[in-house]
Image (cartoon, rainbow, N blue to C red):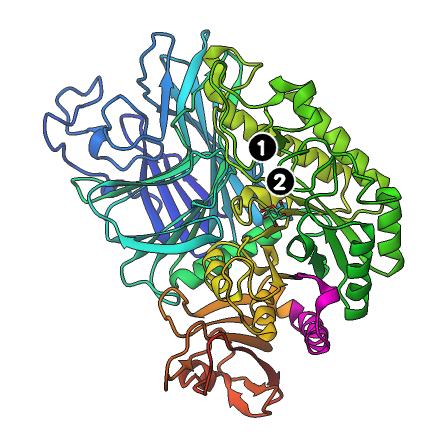
Amino acid sequence: MPIFYDAATRSFRLDAGNSSYVMRVDPHGFLLHLYYGAKISDSDLGYLALPFNTSSFCPNPPGDPFGNFSLDNQPLEYPAYGTGDFRTAAVAIRGRNGCISTALHYRSCEIRPGKYSLPGLPAVYTNSDDEAETLEIVLEDDLTGAEVHLLYGVFANTNVITRAVVIKNTGTAAFSIEKAASAALDFPTMDYDLIHLYGQWAQERRISRESLSHDIRVVSSLRGSSSHNHNPFAALVAHSADEDHGEAYGFSLIYSGNFAIETECDSLDSTRLVMGINATDFSWNLDPGESFATPEAVLVYSQDGIGEMSRTFHKLYRYNLCRGEWKEKKRPILVNNWEATYFAFDDDKLVAIAKDAAELGIEMLVMDDGWFGKRNDDHSSLGDWFVNEQKLKGGLKSLVDRVNALGVQFGIWFEPEMISADSDLIRSHPDWCLCAPGREMSIARTQYVLDMSRADVRDYLFDTISGILSQANIVYVKWDFNRNLTEAGSALLPASQQQEVFHRYVLGLCELLDRLTSAFPHVLFEGCSGGGGRFDPAMLYYSPQIWTSDDTDAIERCRIQYGTSMVYPASAISAHVSACPNHQTGRSTSFETRGNVAMAGAFGYELDLTKLTDEERALVRKQVAQYHAYYDTIQNGDLYRLVSPFENENFCAWEYVSADRKEALVTFVVPRCRVNFTSFVRMKGLDPNMRYQDVETGRIYFGNTLMNAGLNLTAHWKDGDSHIYCFRAVEN
Ligand code: GLA
């Protein structure tokens, strides 16, 4: 089993796959973090604790006035604020005395089979109990009565450890939690690069990689959601690490709200990483007897480069985070009418698109924004989730029946958390908006945000959305979220608890999503937030695919999808072929390239099928056939990133290898051509001794030839060209 506890030395060793993670209770009762990395066989690593106290400016804990021990220079498992460790803290509790000083001493531990879950919060789960074990370590702050339960989910066969923390008030007075990270990690060196994913609307998840230095860095969001700007992910990798070699530690937070991943390198050249709910504008009142659970942090270790780290995340999130009927079910090819019609559609227009979809082999029509209230532009009606029968004459059921009669399934768009300034809902419930009393509300896209911390708001949304979904045969919901939270206060909470609102919002959202996905288990939910502004593991728990970006330009998508693949599997990355010139960039790329790039995700179309030329219709048929032929390799295979669009301006390439290594697909894209450029690409992940046939040319190569000598893809490429090369194993 993966968790070892040595009672004599009070040491813990967690062996997750080929990695080990070691802690020890030191003689003063503090829990030290001593090692995380490649698998080792010793459990007692007490010798790694630092033997000195640097100066009088590093205080000794009470009871050890002349000792060498200072919390300020020890590697700590869950560092507390205000009692001698001046580095970035994981936890800070304000007691009844008004002071924020927290001291956590070890009390007990428990090891049990299976993985813990977190009530009300999304978390990784096991498909069978023998996949993982749970370690629960209890630390205690005597003064406040705060019991801090550190939870570890240790996977036996993959390099994954999950962490979360539950804080219980076992005292007699209320206290407030000012900070409660999900995980903290101390590393003895700072020889790492920090990788994280940043961006903005229509340019999500660009890859940033920089060496750590003696400072504090924060990758974070205060937007109320994970955001376009920073993904709740960071990696620490060796300076020399690349896709295939070197150590990489990946950290992903299963949270769709304000988060922070802080890294601090101190004067001892060690590194601390702390991740969890953003402590800015956060404070949580905990009465005696109450508990507070943090979101879950996922830790992935790779000794074989950044690519292996990503593949570990992909498998975990595909099979141990996504849930429900659609987790592994083949996703339908859909056509979404947003870029086809925007708000200008009616039932006949949608049926016309569905008719072409049926002829072309497209399996689902998604009716996007504009079907409800009196919404003919983005100025009104969010919250009024009632069908606009002037647009959909005969009502929703009639439309869905007509689409279904063509053999096409039907999906629908909602933006549940929002309320338009011009809506019946705001006129009847002005107090349902998030607001800071006395301050005028900021407005974005003429909409405000509903107070998801309120049960009455959630009940209204559950009832209205259920009402729509029950009216007709609807099998897909696109759940959008098109602005960030401001003036985040709730009309129902006292002044002393307003700093709970950001987190209560997320809890409310999770509760509503849980209710709806349970009530409608057949419905495929797709997450969305102005494109990929909420592309995070928490949303994946409820919606196994997420609209990746509002930028549908194939060349831009190469970067967006490449960055997204750092953490998220192809099955999650919703990607559509759209019309040209592209609506976001004005660029024109070939229909083939738009298909080849979209093929790397949950595939679909986002254009007016009725306007396609015969030639384009033939290409749609070809792409639909390709999607089916390649489905298993792309959706269930392993991704190898070959040439990064962030590092090579002329071409980029990625590869999927089927689980049995018998099929490999290389997608090659030329974003920007130049004269006489050469393009050699080494394939990865093949069986070196197997022979593979290039399906198009018939030429046969050994796997080791393709991986070492590589492919020569030099040709007279033009801007925006692309190709998918398919290799299949042949009998030796
Ligand atoms: C967001 C989404 C788009 C579309 C519009 C509708 O921007 O990302 O795909 O649904 O909203 O208003």
Whether residue 2 is visible: yes
Give me the residue at 36% from left, 34% from top.
Answer: 10
* Circle 2 SS class: loop
Q: Which mark is residue 378?
A: 2
The residue sitting at the left extreme is: 55
Within 8 Å: ligand 1 and the Cβ of disc 2?
Answer: yes
Identify the secondary structure beneath mark 1.
Answer: strand
Nearer the observer, 612 or 530:
612
Q: Main secondary structure of the magenta part?
A: helix
Relative height, residue 406 to residue 375 (above, below): below
Stretch in magenta: 604-631
x then y, percent, for residue 324: 70, 47
Marks 2 and 1 sit apart, C-alpha to C-alpha, by 9 Å
For the C terminus, the quadrant is bottom right
Taking 680 as reference, is 671 above or below it? Answer: above
Whole-percent x, y for residue 615 in the image: 69, 78
Q: Horizontally, is 298 left or right of 347 in the view?
A: left
> The disc labelled 1 sits on which kind of residue?
Gln
Left or right, 397 with reference to 232 = right
**Left or right relative to 435: residue 660:** right
For the residues labelled 2 and 1, say whether their Cβ atoms are less than 8 Å apart: yes
Residue at label 1?
447
Q: Residues within 10 Å of mark 1 (few under 14, many from 20)?
A: many
Q: Is residue 331 visible?
A: no
**Earlier residue among tags 2 and 1:** 2
**Is 140 a magenta residue?**
no
Residue 276 in the image: state x and y as whole percent: 43, 35
